Amino acid sequence: MPRDKRKVESALETKGFQRDERHHHYFLYRTQAGKLTEIRTRTSHSGKEIDTRLLSRMAQQCQLNRSDFLALVDCTVSQADYEITIADLLN
């Protein structure tokens, strides 16, 4: 199911992703402790919705399956929960 692009971007920012200064459609993940990670994703340049194909790709980039990624952007998973899920990548 597609998601509103603005809501996805806002949710990512709420969960610790920061817009890349060089390109406003790229998001870099910074942990709660402030450490910049290798985890990054991006949204589309066009359109008001993000389709299921791009949502799946974004999930992969964030090291999640699609349902977990949707829970992250739908705000049913917290930033702390996300960090527990990707803990192996953060060390």
Image (cartoon, rainbow, N blue to C red):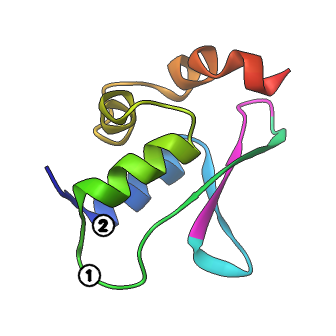
Which residue type carries mark 2? Lys
Q: Which quadrant is the C terminus positioned in?
A: top right
The span picked out in magenta is 26-33
Classify 29 as above or below 42: above
Which residue does the image show at 74% across and 17% down from the upper left? 88
> Residue 81 in the image: x percent, y percent?
52, 18
Residue 82 shown left or right of residue 69 in the figure: right
Classify 73 as above or below 75: below
> Residue 74 in the image: x percent, y percent?
28, 39
Which residue does the image show at 57% across and 17% down from the upper left? 85
Which residue does the image show at 42% across and 60% down from the upper left? 9
Between 53 and 71, the residue placed more toward the observer is: 53
> Circles 2 and 1: CB distance less than 8 Å?
yes
Residue position for label 2 = 5
Classify 56 as above or below 10: above
Sequence-first disc among 2 and 1: 2
> Residue 54 in the image: x percent, y percent?
36, 59
Residue position for label 1 = 47
